[in-house]
Amino acid sequence: MTESTLSSQFTDLQKAVAHHLGLGIDSAKWSADQTAIIAMIIKRGLRQFYHPPRIYPDEPSHQWSFLKPTVTLTTVGTYSTGTVEVSSGTCTLTDGVWPSWAATHGTLTIGTTEYAITTRDGDTELTVVGDDVAAETTYSLTHSGNYDLPEDFGGIEGNMTYEPSEHKEDILIVGEGKIRNLRGGQTARSCPIYAAVRPKECAGTSVGQRFEIMFFPIPNDAYDLSYKKIILASALTGTIKYPYGGAMHAETLEASCIAMAELQEDEKKGPMYDYFIERLTASIQIDKTAYSAEFLGYNRDNSDAVHRDGGRNDRHRGNFLVTYNGEI
């Protein structure tokens, strides 16, 4: 698909900022320091645009619809393909391939014994802690039920949903304490009805903080789960050329970057900040109308409906889980 010729890409923003700073628009004539300053200003302009200030005192800061795409997370079930042999701490798989999550989220059970997995050393080898076992032994590799979320993940809006063909209720997003509490009293695996997002521990030496999502019950199979992801956008570079928002908001983004150049140069807000606010007001209105529904459906009387807690029917779901032969 051809990009709109009215969109602004990284080089357009570089030229706009450089022109305001009086550096000209020929990047070949910019010094290394000037190029770095321009990039720093654009980064600040992007932050201001993606996370804008409040326009009206009685309204919160606007959250852009284009930073909330619907994406899919696929769960996994128990893996037990092939047979295994354990010798001197190496678990070798025959007629199968160890899943990529084996060492990070997997629990290996051979017979009735659980083996701690240290590393995944290849498609057919794991380093484990435990006794040796003979070749051609059956096993099971189960997932922890905690899934790493994308690097640009900044939150979930609303609940998670199954594919329509699954005919299952939405997965309700709850606090991680509820998941830990539920898991403490229930080990059966089934289709999830609750999920929680929590931050992962981060040393900050090589990457920033990441997040994971916990499910209850722990999924027993592969389910395609859709959710609206709040994006943490990246800075623009020679490789990441186009900002979120597209041509509809290009003028607002450019005004944000020039307003930051003005602040950098004069150490105070000036006329370009006022212009940015003017453009921001217009962009917010565009964003509110471009993705809004014209008709929301029949507003029927639900006074006699079964009461639900956050969309979860507590008569059938919640803490009262019934199992049969280990299945929920």
Image: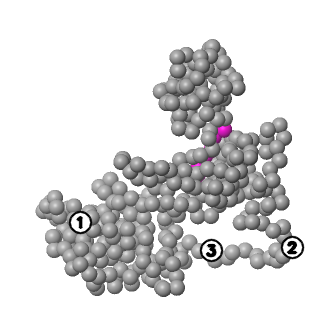
Tell me: residue 217, above or below residue 266. above
Query: Is 28 on the left-hand or right-hand side of 143?
Result: left
Q: Amino acid at mark 3?
A: Ala
Which residue is rendered at x = 55% and y = 16% of the image? 87
Magenta stretch holds residue 76: yes
Q: Secondary structure at mark 1?
A: helix
Residue 238: mark? none
Label whose residue precedes the other's in the sequence (2 or 1): 1
Q: Which residue is mark 1?
A: 38
Residue 304: mark? 2
Measured Cα–Cα span from mark 1 to mark 3: 40 Å
Which residue is rendered at x = 43% and y = 71% of the image? 51
Residue 60 visible in this rendered orientation of the protein: yes
Q: Looking at the image, what colour scheme do you see?
A: one colour
Q: Which residue is mark 3?
A: 293
Query: Is 22 on the left-hand or right-hand side of 139?
Result: left
In front of the other: 45 or 324: 324
Which residue is rendered at x = 61% and y = 50% of the image? 214
Q: Amino acid at mark 2?
A: Asp
Q: Secondary structure at mark 3?
A: loop
Q: Amino acid at mark 1?
A: Ile
- Other-residue count near label 2 (Cα within 10 Å), few / some / many at <14 / 14–19 / ≥20: few
Magenta stretch holds residue 74: yes
